Amino acid sequence: MTRTAKVGTAFAIFAAAVSFLISLAGSSLKSTVQVFFLNIADGFDVSRGSLAIATTLFAVVTAITSSVIGHLADRIGAIPVLAIGTALNGIVLLVSATAGELWMFVLTYGVVGAVAVTMLSFVPLGVLADQLFQGRNSGLFYALLTNGAAVGFIVLVPLWTYLDDRMSWNRVLFAIGVVFLVVLLPLSLALVRLSVRRRPAAAAAAPRVSFWSATAITFRHPQMRALVLAFVGCGTTMAFIDVHLFPHLHDHGISDSVGASAVAVLGALEIAGSLAAGRLCDLGWTRATLMAAYALRATAMAMLLVVDLPATVIAFGAVFGASYLATVVATTVWVTRALPPGVRGTALGVLWAVHMLAVAVTSQGGAILADLHHNYTATIVASVVLTAVSVLLVARQPSPDAAAGDDTAPQEDIRPPVEV
């Protein structure tokens, strides 16, 4: 191995390690508010509904800004976006911890916090994997990065639960903010400095496409339209897990301990499934992997119609977990292979904007239907149908792997950049 190759490998390892840590820590802003939700409401002496404005605003702003942040990653690179997001996360945590009024907390967390978390999310991480590896093993690398959030779910949530009775939510948020600014921000800035030195000439000369042109290219591409529609099934089912799973299990007499065990199994299989999906995509099985992931998702949701036995609930966690990030990894790899540089980040942002809208609709719609019918059957059946449709949509598309090295989007679609 030449010296240049060794330096490149060392940089990739350092970039992966720092990005993984940032991704892991980035999940803390959402998870702390989820765990400390009641304590925060009591701290401001407000109702749950009043504090929920912050979390609702967070979801809306995330949906609105995802494509913009993806476009920013295309323009300036994913690593600088991660560094900016790291700084913003630290500031948001400190301000949220010291906010004296509810309106200040709502605006800080719901608006600035949403932008900060999106800068550390699946969108810039997908662009980073593509920019570092340029299609070679990018699927596995992306799976590794996104598992930062998965590990955060497994490790950090129990930590916040442990600290719930031992520290005030203000102190926890303040301490995490200090870690962001004192530890993670210097690491991210060091990564930026190294990436600037190693930036390939081809990347520097990549076409600069305006935000609106990149968005138009995304929607004109037939494969992208299919992937966006299929991703609705991903968002719908994820929302059910995040919001409605435990109430649904409770309605069927399943204890919280069994539900927690199912979630633990889901988390473990989530990691394994994402790594397997990344590797399969790198081997040229992107379409088959995405179809299998959606098929597993539809099967898992159908299993929720019969959850009278604990063993069925655990099995559901395993099947759903295997598909949990597999849909994300395979879809991201597909986007980076089907679209040219300068457009991919925006396209990933569009995907996640639609995903978050599906999350919002399922969260609210599922609750309304449950109030009307006193069960989640209609929501579950709708989720099964949507994910089955996702399988069909993906099956009708030509494989992106055959032309992985080509710009499959028509070059005439890339117009001169318009500053936005």
Image (tube, helix red, strand yellow):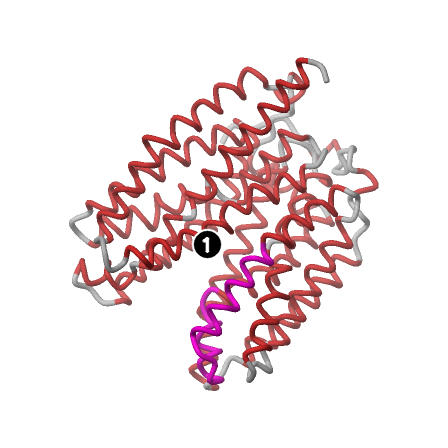
Residue range in magenta is: 242-270
Q: Position of residue 300 (x, y in %)?
A: 63, 70
Instruction: Give the farthest residue toward the top.
Output: 3
User: Badge 1, how many Cα within 10 Å: few under 14, some, many 20+?
Assistant: some
Q: Residue at x 73, y 62 (%)?
A: 391
Q: Residue at x 64, y 60 (%)?
A: 322
Q: Position of residue 230 (x, y in %)?
A: 66, 59
**400 and 220: which one is in front?**
400
Type of secondary structure dominating the magenta stretch: helix
Quadrant, the N terminus? top right
Instruction: Give the farthest residue toward the right.
Output: 402
Count up the numbered dots: 1
Viewed as shown, does residue 361 lie left or right of 106?
right
Q: Residue at x 56, y 60 (%)?
A: 235
Q: Which residue is mark 1?
A: 153
Q: Amino acid at mark 1?
A: Phe
Q: Position of residue 389 (x, y in %)?
A: 70, 66
Residue 362 versus residue 218 in the image, above or below: below
**311 and 148: which one is in front?**
311
Q: Quadrant of residue 257?
A: bottom left
Viewed as shown, does residue 220 lie left or right of 184?
right
Residue 221 versus residue 270 in the image, above or below: above
Q: Position of residue 44 (x, y in %)?
A: 18, 58
User: Helix, strand or loop at disc 1?
Assistant: helix
- Quick check: is 126 in the magenta stretch? no
Viewed as shown, does residue 277 lie left or right of 92?
right
- Quick check: is 254 in the magenta stretch? yes
